[in-house]
Image (cartoon, rainbow, N blue to C red):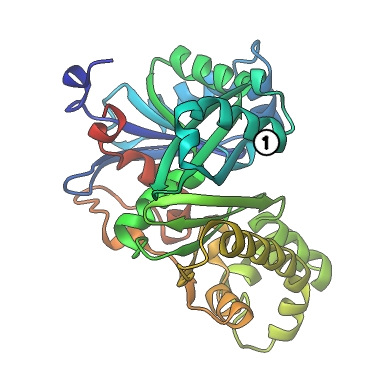
């Protein structure tokens, strides 16, 4: 496809997660936000829409989002799409330099070894991200064809033109690279409502991913159960007190500790894989927490103490200029990090 016809036309981001769809239009040269919006969805219906070609649930809700939920303007029809990281398979591996001549076959072999879906049923993309005289380092990403096909069908039926599709953690990595010293070897902990994605960002590229089915909603349920309070009260305790010092700290930490320990164990596993298999020379230098679950006060300090490395909640909002637009309320800003990363993609990077 010719770069000439596409490069200067605007691209909007469309983040399709298990719990909702977000949209954003950004001028990546000025980081100026032209428009944004979101719509909450039912996870089981999203899952069905991704796996069932007859479902119109995603299409119908994208149409509602475009017609009724946008603040500002997202006039472009050309969209970069993020899909749930948990529905993708990413892997970084090294191969002898001589393998490059038959790289496609080597990647398919790697996919058949490590992905529990036959390679014939996957869309597989890959790129060489490092090379020496002796070996090449390859990043591979794969997603089941049925999921990609159904998402693309839904988006096109909603009147949009898809030009890029990627796992959501790659969109997050793009934004953090530009706003949060993401050039440093960085651990990303993306805590969504129902899942947590973990990744290593190194030299602007996601190298390793992991994840588990624990998220911000899990924290709320943990507090409600342990302290015997209603969910609404549990949410308030989570976002106002969290892990910070106070009269309820011991009970709240006790309620949250089991889920946090499971996230921490997965973080250590991903870090160990990076240290042992990806880079023995570049040291991980920071951990950034993003996503809706990052609104837990004290979570940065929790990871700092547990891992003995600098950790904090990422805040790329100083980079994004909403100008005259009404900004998202503070508690909802984390949900837009993925779509902001999508919307900030350089068209030239797509059509190179």
Question: Residue at 57% across / 41% down in the picture?
Answer: 90
| Residue 105 seen in the figure | yes
Q: Looking at the image, is 338 positioned above or below residue 303?
A: above
User: Dot 1 lies on which element?
Assistant: helix
The residue that disc 1 covers is 43
Residue 295 picture location, percent across and down: 53, 65
Residue 298 picture location, percent across and down: 56, 77
Is residue 182 found left or right of 244 in the rendered image? Answer: left
Most foreground residue, 31 or 238: 31
Question: Residue at 58% across / 18% down in the picture?
Answer: 150
Count of numbered tags: 1
Question: Residue at 61% across / 63% down in the picture?
Answer: 276
Question: Residue at 82% across / 71% down in the picture?
Answer: 226
Indicate the quadrant containing the N terminus: top left, top right, bottom left or bottom right: top left
Is residue 19 found left or right of 65 in the rendered image? Answer: right
Q: Looking at the image, is 172 positioned above or below residue 14?
A: below
Q: Mark 1 Cα within 10 Å, few/some/many (few <14, many 20+)?
A: some
| Residue 15 seen in the figure | no
Residue 50 picture location, percent across and down: 63, 24
Q: Looking at the image, is 302 positioned above or below residue 222?
A: below
Is residue 138 found left or right of 238 in the rendered image? Answer: left
């Amino acid at each position: 496809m010719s770069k000439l016809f596409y490069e200067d036309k605007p691209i909007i981001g469309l983040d399709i997660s298990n719990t909702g769809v977000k949209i954003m239009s950004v001028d990546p040269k000025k980081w100026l936000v032209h428009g944004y919006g979101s719509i909450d969805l039912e996870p089981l219906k999203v899952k069905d829409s991704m796996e069932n070609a007859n479902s119109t649930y995603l299409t119908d809700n994208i149409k509602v989002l475009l017609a009724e939920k946008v603040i500002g303007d997202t006039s472009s029809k050309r969209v970069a799409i993020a899909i749930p990281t948990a529905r993708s398979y990413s892997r970084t591996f090294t191969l002898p330099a001589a393998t490059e001549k038959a790289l496609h076959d080597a990647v398919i072999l790697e996919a058949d070894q490590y992905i529990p879906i036959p390679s014939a049923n996957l869309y597989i993309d890959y790129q060489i991200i490092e090379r020496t005289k002796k070996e090449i380092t390859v990043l591979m990403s794969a997603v089941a064809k049925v999921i990609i096909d159904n998402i693309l069908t839904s988006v096109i039926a909603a009147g949009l033109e898809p030009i890029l599709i990627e796992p959501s953690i790659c969109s997050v990595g793009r934004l953090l690279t530009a706003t949060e010293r993401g050039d440093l070897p960085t651990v990303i902990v993306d805590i969504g409502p129902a899942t947590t994605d973990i990744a290593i960002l190194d030299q602007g590229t996601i190298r390793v991913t992991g994840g588990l089915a624990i998220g911000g909603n899990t924290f709320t349920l943990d507090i409600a159960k342990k302290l015997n309070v209603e969910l609404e009260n549990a949410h308030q305790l989570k976002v106002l007190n969290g892990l910070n010092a106070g009269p309820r700290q011991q009970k709240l930490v006790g309620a949250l500790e089991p889920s946090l320990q499971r996230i921490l164990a997965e973080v250590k596993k991903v870090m160990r894989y990076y240290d042992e298999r990806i880079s023995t020379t570049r040291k991980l230098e920071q951990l950034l927490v993003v996503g809706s679950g990052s609104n837990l006060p004290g979570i940065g300090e929790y990871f700092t103490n547990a891992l003995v490395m600098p950790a904090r909640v990422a805040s790329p909002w100083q980079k994004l200029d909403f100008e005259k637009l009404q900004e998202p309320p503070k508690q909802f800003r984390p949900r837009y990090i993925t779509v902001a990363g999508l919307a900030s993609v350089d068209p030239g990077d797509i059509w190179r």
